[in-house]
């Protein structure tokens, strides 16, 4: 393989920055990813959120696997800062903490996923690949817990009927976008799928949020999964 081929191969890899204060875990994760996936390259290991921010310029990651609880700057706050500074970098929370607040804040701050550390290595690799293509993923345990919380926050059948009536009044394009939101697509992936611009997607999303009375993407996902969209 010549130098040009080497450069092309390196450029095609998913470049990952790890952020975790447990060094042994990070080093083992690095070894596992690079051993099992030839399309993944770990470009750096940070020990906290602040160091992750400082390492971005020198490592140029496509994706960051971020722990939640770390010294100096926790993963959720680091996610907020990184998303503001580098909106194209995909951040995935990889943690042991199944906490509603962490999940909600991480998503609001721009995280593409929230995955528990007990995930099978092959499933983690598959998740990384999917997220690198634009998917938004959450561990099943987290989705189940969040759905239960959202269900407990709403009155039940009457609320579902109300949401169905709202969805029935959405325009065709809004319904198309809502279907993709329900599948976990982010705005970039929706734009790519529907052949429209990201600003256009954002405008439609804002309109949907206003009509259903929520700015919470997880709640909108939950609503979309409850109502009937298949034939609309």
Image (cartoon, grey):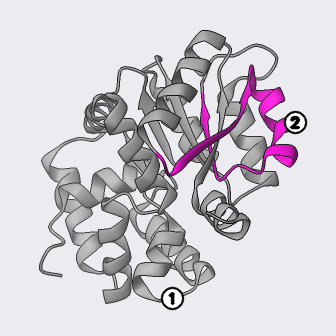
**Quadrant location of residue 69?**
top right
167 vs 84, left or right, is left
Q: Are marks 1 and 2 in contact (CB under 8 Å)?
A: no
Q: Which residues are magenta?
A: 38-66
Query: Which residue does the image show at 23% across and 41% down from the upper left?
Result: 155
**Quadrant location of residue 80?**
top right
Please report whichever mark, 1 or 2, sits nearer to the chain's N-terminal start: 2
- Whether residue 90 is visible here, answered yes or no, is yes
Query: Which residue does the image show at 83% across and 28% down from the upper left?
Result: 50
Badge 1 is on which residue?
A: 196
- Whether residue 22 is visible here, answered yes or no, is no
Query: Camera-side residue: 193 or 36?
Result: 36
Please tell me whether residue 39 belongs to the stretch shown in magenta: yes
48 vs 228, left or right, is right
Q: Residue 163: image x %, image y %?
A: 26, 62
Q: Residue 184: image x %, image y %?
A: 37, 57
122 vs 231, left or right, is right
193 versus 180 height, above or below:
below
Query: Camera-side residue: 186 or 118?
Result: 118
Number of on-image labels: 2
Instruction: Give the quarter of the figure containing the C terminus.
Output: bottom left
Please tell me whether residue 207 belongs to the stretch shown in magenta: no
Label 2 neighbour load within 10 Å: few <14, some 14-19, many 20+:
few
178 versus 30 height, above or below:
below
Q: Residue 192: image x %, image y %?
A: 47, 80
Which SS class for mark 1? loop
Which SS class for mark 2? helix
Query: Which residue does the image show at 79% across and 45% down from the upper left?
Result: 59
Q: Residue 76: image x %, image y %?
A: 65, 31
Query: Camera-side residue: 166 or 8?
Result: 8
Badge 2 is on which residue?
A: 54
């Amino acid at each position: 393989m010549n130098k040009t081929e080497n450069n092309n191969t390196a450029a095609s890899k998913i470049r990952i920055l790890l952020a975790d204060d447990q060094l042994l875990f990070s080093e083992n994760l690095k070894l596992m990813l690079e051993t099992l996936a030839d399309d993944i390259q770990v470009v750096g290991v940070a020990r906290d959120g602040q160091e992750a921010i400082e390492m971005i310029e020198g490592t140029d990651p496509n994706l960051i696997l971020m722990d939640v609880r770390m010294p100096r700057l926790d993963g959720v706050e680091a996610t907020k800062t990184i998303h503001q500074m580098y909106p194209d970098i995909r951040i995935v929370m990889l943690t042991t903490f199944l906490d509603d607040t962490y999940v909600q804040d991480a998503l609001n701050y721009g995280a593409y996923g929230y995955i528990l550390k007990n995930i099978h290595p092959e499933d983690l690799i598959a998740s990384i690949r999917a997220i690198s293509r634009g998917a938004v993923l959450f561990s099943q345990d987290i989705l189940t817990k969040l759905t239960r919380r959202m269900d407990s926050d709403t009155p039940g059948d009457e609320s579902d009927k109300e949401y169905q009536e709202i969805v029935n009044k959405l325009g065709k394009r809004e319904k198309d976008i809502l279907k993709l939101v329900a599948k976990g697509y982010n705005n970039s992936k929706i734009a790519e799928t529907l052949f429209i611009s990201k600003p256009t997607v954002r405008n439609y999303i804002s309109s949907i949020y206003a009509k259903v009375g929520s700015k919470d993407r997880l709640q909108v996902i939950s609503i979309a999964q409850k109502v009937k969209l298949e034939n609309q």
